[in-house]
Structures are given as structure tokens and as C-alpha cells.
């Protein structure tokens, strides 16, 4: 059963209280997406990608609002709606299940390792274990976060993430104005421009071996969140009680707009800081040094602010790690509800426990293997394949299927207006073309084999389940 719906907001304070699922969504990307990747983009390309980030975030907001709108109107999660796609029943949700089983542990391992780089720097152990100490710290931090997650739930997550987002938002706005950016150059970055690696980037091995297209599309997958984050957002609407009635569309619109406006602000601030401070020094967040360079954003103002930065960065990345782990049970809950509702309801606690333990154990395995091998790939290299699937291709698929769900499951009166339809089609093409091109540039034919294999695995699994159901 869904929780009882709250009354519609009437006052300004009521509207502010609506900000809950959107805070979780924002915090999932702000920790690593902005601190690392927006900064990295600013260091490499200056302000030239700001327009690109704005376009990406607009299409991701559109994706979130369109799918959440379906939830408000039908009370059904996209996984439930997609069960009726042509072909073996449930084949597409099963593809998302297969990808989740592989991708979530990689994401969790990446966030834990990133947090580990910060702790290694603070403790002066960065060079220990052959420069792999951040993986050891990541293992310890992930173990502690796993225990915390098992004791938490949606309400704990929402309260924690609202506080983290509010504190960070005030901090970065203050930092931007104190740094006195060149506002003309910043706003000029909102105009489309070509980009290329600066000549000095050739001194960085990680950049030399990384195609420009893959580098820029990696930002697409991380900034603003991944497809699974958005599907979890829709699931959180059940916890909020915003389902099954058209009246909840307005609170969803407010919540999602505030979320993406916050992410856009963070993106602009950290891009500007990277362009102003790291780019002139030819410094790039890379390898095992993803978060320490950013102390320079505050130390010129007052050296002791470095302590405040490290605290804020730790909380931000921890919020991302905690939120990502919590996305897993929300996703699995909806997959179970779509594939077998009776199992979803009778074994809800078991599904949550399995989901958390699976992604955390997988993340620990990723970190342990990286710790054991003497020359492991960098954290960004570990993340890139999963990111291109979950953060780019998945977004394109969700945009396209929003159009199908609209036509299949809603009356004409409830369907999206033509502008929303056209924008979803454009967003779907945008993400799919970017993702496919990046995969070709990244691993060429091998990537296509993985892509085709995943599709076939989902179809085969759905066919087997359908036969078992018919035989029983």
C-alpha cells in the first residue's frame, strides 16, 4: 500500500517542505559530479562547456518530470508500464536488472574510492601501498556506510540529503562571489563553442589516452545523475504519497525544478573555479587526486578554510555514496513489483537487504581488486563503461519510452502536450547518439558486442520466465 498522501501545499513554507525526493536526486550528483567533473571540465576547457551542461541538465529534468508525471497519473512505476512493450513480457525491465547488477557495484566502488582519496590526503597516506592507499580507505569507508544504510531508509535519507544540499548551496554561492569571476566570460560559456584539449594536457597520461568525445560524454553521464537515479526518484514518490492523482503533478514539478536548478548552480560554480584557479596552473583532478586540488578554491581567501572545504567535500561525497546505495533497493523494489508483485510485497525486507548487500559487496570487490593489482586503472577509467550505459544510453531509452508509455497507458486528456512530446523525442535522440558514439570511440566493436549481448540476455531471460509461467 502507498502511504497516505499529504495535503497539497498552500503557503511558501509548504512548498519548501515539498523539496524531498529532489534533494536526494541533487545530492547524488553534487558530491562527485560537481566537485570532480565540473571542476575537471573547467580546468580542461574553461567555460566552454557550460552551454553543454545546461542542455544536458534540461533534458535530464525533462526525463524526470515526464516519468514522474506518469507515476502521479497512473500510480505505476515505469518498470510496470514497460512490462507491456512488444516482445517477451518484461524483457526491457530485465535488461535494466542485468545492468543494475553489474553497474551499481562499480558506481559504489567509485564513490567509495573517491572518498578514500580525500581521507588518504588528510591522513598523509596517499603514497602508501604503492599509491593505492585510497582503495584501502575506500574499503573501510564503504563497510561503515553499509552498516549505516542497513539501519536507515527513505526518511533518514531525505533528512540527511536536504541538510547537505542546503549547506553546500550556501557555501558555493558565497565562494563564487568572493572569487570574483569574469562574468562576461562565464556567461559567454552559455553560447555553443567547440572544445579541444589544451596543449599542456598532453603531460597528463590519463588525458592523452582518453578520446575527447569520451571525456565530454562522461560528464553527460555523471552531471545531473544517471538513469537509475531518476527511476529511483519516481519510486520515492510512493514514499512521499504523490501518486495516483493529477494534483501531485505541481509538487513534482516544483521539487524537480528546484533539484535541477541547484545542480546547475553547482555545476556553474565548480566549472568557474576550475577555469579560474586550476586551468592557469595546468592542474586537473585525475588519477588518485580527485578532490585535493579543489582546496585552492577557498585557501586564497583564508588558509584555514581548507578544513571547512575538506569537511564539506567529505559530507558531499558521502551523501553521494549513501544515496547511491539507497538507489539500489528502490530500483529493485520497483523491478520486483513489475515482475512479480506478490514476491515484492511478501519479501520486501529481503529484497532491500539483498540489494544493499549485493552492491556493497560488489563495490568492496572492485576496491579489493584495485588494491591487490599493482597497476590498477584509475577511478575514472573504472567508472567510464558503466557510466556510459547508465548515465547516457539509459537516459535516452527512458526518454523514448516516456513517449510510448504516454500513448499506451494514458487517455488523450492526460497525455503530454506536443512541446513535451517533441522535447522528449529530441532528448532521447540526444542521449542515444552521444552514448553510442562514445562507446564506439571507447572500445569500438567490443562495446557493441557488450551492448548486443545485454539486449539478448534480457530477451532470453524474459522468454525463459514466460515459459516457466506457462508450464506452471
Image (cartoon, helix red, strand yellow):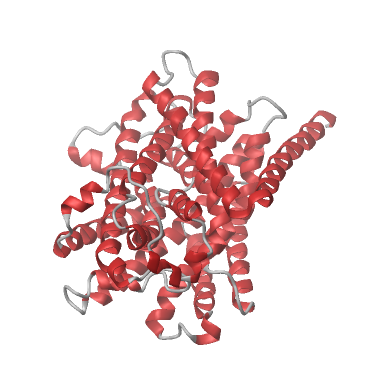
Determine if residue 147 is in view. no
Residue 36 in the image, given as x and y percentages of width and height: 39, 63
Position of residue 360 in the picture relative to residue 262 (left or right): right
Residue at 23% across, 39% down: 14
Q: Looking at this view, name the residue that lies furthest to the top.
A: 412
Give the residue at x 32% y 43%.
192
Instruction: Identify whether 419 is placed above or below 168.
Output: above
| In the displayed structure image, the side of residue 304 where residue 441 appears, left or right | right
Q: Nearer the viewer, residue 98 or 465?
A: 98
24 or 422, nearer to the observer:
422
Q: Residue at x 41, y 59 (%)?
A: 197
Q: Nearer the viewer, residue 458 or 253?
A: 458
* Residue 126, image x, y percentages: 45, 82
Toward which corner of the image does residue 236 lie, by quadrant?
top left
Q: Position of residue 210 (x, y in %)?
A: 52, 60
Side of 29 where 376 appears, left or right: right
- Compared with 406, 272 (above or below) is below
Q: Observer-nearest residue: 6 or 300? A: 300
Q: Quadrant of the C terminus?
A: top right
> Could you tell me if residue 251 is visible in this image?
yes
Q: Residue at x 16, y 73 (%)?
A: 301
- Residue 294 percent location from the top left of the image: 31, 69
Please tell me how many numbered marks the rendered image carries.
Answer: 0
Outermost residue, right side: 471
Amino acid at each position: 500500500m502507498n502511504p497516505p498522501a499529504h495535503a497539497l501545499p498552500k503557503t511558501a513554507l509548504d512548498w519548501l517542505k515539498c523539496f524531498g525526493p529532489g534533494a536526494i536526486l541533487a545530492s547524488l550528483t553534487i558530491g562527485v559530479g560537481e566537485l570532480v567533473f565540473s571542476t575537471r571540465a573547467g580546468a580542461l576547457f574553461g567555460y566552454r562547456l557550460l552551454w553543454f551542461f545546461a542542455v544536458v541538465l534540461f533534458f535530464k529534468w525533462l526525463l524526470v518530470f515526464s516519468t514522474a508525471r506518469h507515476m502521479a497519473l497512473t500510480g505505476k512505476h515505469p518498470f510496470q508500464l514497460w512490462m507491456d512493450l512488444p516482445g517477451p513480457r518484461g524483457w526491457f525491465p530485465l535488461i535494466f536488472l542485468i545492468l543494475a547488477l553489474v553497474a551499481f557495484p562499480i558506481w559504489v566502488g567509485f564513490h567509495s574510492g573517491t572518498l578514500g582519496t580525500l581521507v588518504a590526503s588528510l591522513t598523509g597516506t596517499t603514497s602508501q601501498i604503492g599509491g593505492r592507499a585510497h582503495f584501502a580507505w575506500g574499503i573501510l569507508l564503504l563497510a561503515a556506510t553499509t552498516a549505516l544504510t542497513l539501519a536507515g531508509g527513505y526518511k533518514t535519507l531525505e533528512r540527511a540529503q536536504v541538510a547537505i544540499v542546503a549547506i553546500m548551496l550556501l557555501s558555493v554561492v558565497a565562494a563564487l562571489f568572493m572569487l570574483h569571476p569574469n562574468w562576461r566570460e562565464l556567461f559567454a560559456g552559455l553560447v555553443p563553442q567547440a572544445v579541444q584539449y589544451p596543449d599542456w594536457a598532453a603531460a597528463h597520461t590519463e588525458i592523452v589516452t582518453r578520446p575527447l568525445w569520451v571525456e565530454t560524454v562522461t560528464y553527460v553521464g555523471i552531471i545531473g545523475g544517471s538513469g537509475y537515479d531518476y527511476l529511483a526518484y519516481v519510486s520515492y514518490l510512493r514514499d512521499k504519497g504523490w501518486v495516483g492523482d493529477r494534483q501531485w503533478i505541481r509538487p513534482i514539478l516544483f521539487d524537480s525544478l528546484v533539484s535541477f536548478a541547484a545542480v546547475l548552480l553547482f555545476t556553474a560554480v565548480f566549472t568557474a573555479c576550475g577555469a579560474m584557479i586550476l586551468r592557469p596552473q595546468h592542474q586537473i583532478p585525475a588519477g588518485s587526486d580527485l578532490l585535493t586540488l579543489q582546496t585552492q578554491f577557498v585557501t586564497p581567501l583564508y588558509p584555514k578554510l581548507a578544513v571547512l572545504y575538506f569537511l564539506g567535500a567529505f559530507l558531499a561525497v558521502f551523501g553521494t555514496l549513501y544515496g547511491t546505495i539507497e538507489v539500489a533497493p528502490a530500483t529493485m523494489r520497483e523491478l520486483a513489483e513489475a515482475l512479480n508483485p506478490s514476491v515484492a510485497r511478501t519479501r520486501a525486507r529481503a529484497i532491500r537487504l539483498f540489494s544493499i548487500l549485493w552492491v556493497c559487496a560488489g563495490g568492496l570487490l572492485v576496491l579489493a581488486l584495485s588494491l591487490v593489482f599493482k597497476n590498477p586503472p584509475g577511478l575514472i577509467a573504472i567508472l567510464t563503461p558503466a557510466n556510459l550505459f547508465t548515465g547516457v544510453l539509459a537516459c535516452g531509452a527512458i526518454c523514448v519510452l516516456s513517449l510510448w508509455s504516454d500513448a499506451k497507458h494514458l487517455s488523450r486528456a492526460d497525455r503530454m502536450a506536443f512541446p513535451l512530446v517533441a522535447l522528449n523525442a529530441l532528448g532521447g535522440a540526444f542521449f542515444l547518439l552521444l552514448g553510442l558514439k562514445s562507446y564506439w570511440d571507447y572500445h569500438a566493436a567490443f562495446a557493441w558486442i557488450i551492448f548486443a549481448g545485454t539486449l539478448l540476455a534480457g530477451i532470453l531471460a524474459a522468454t525463459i520466465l514466460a515459459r516457466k509461467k506457462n508450464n506452471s
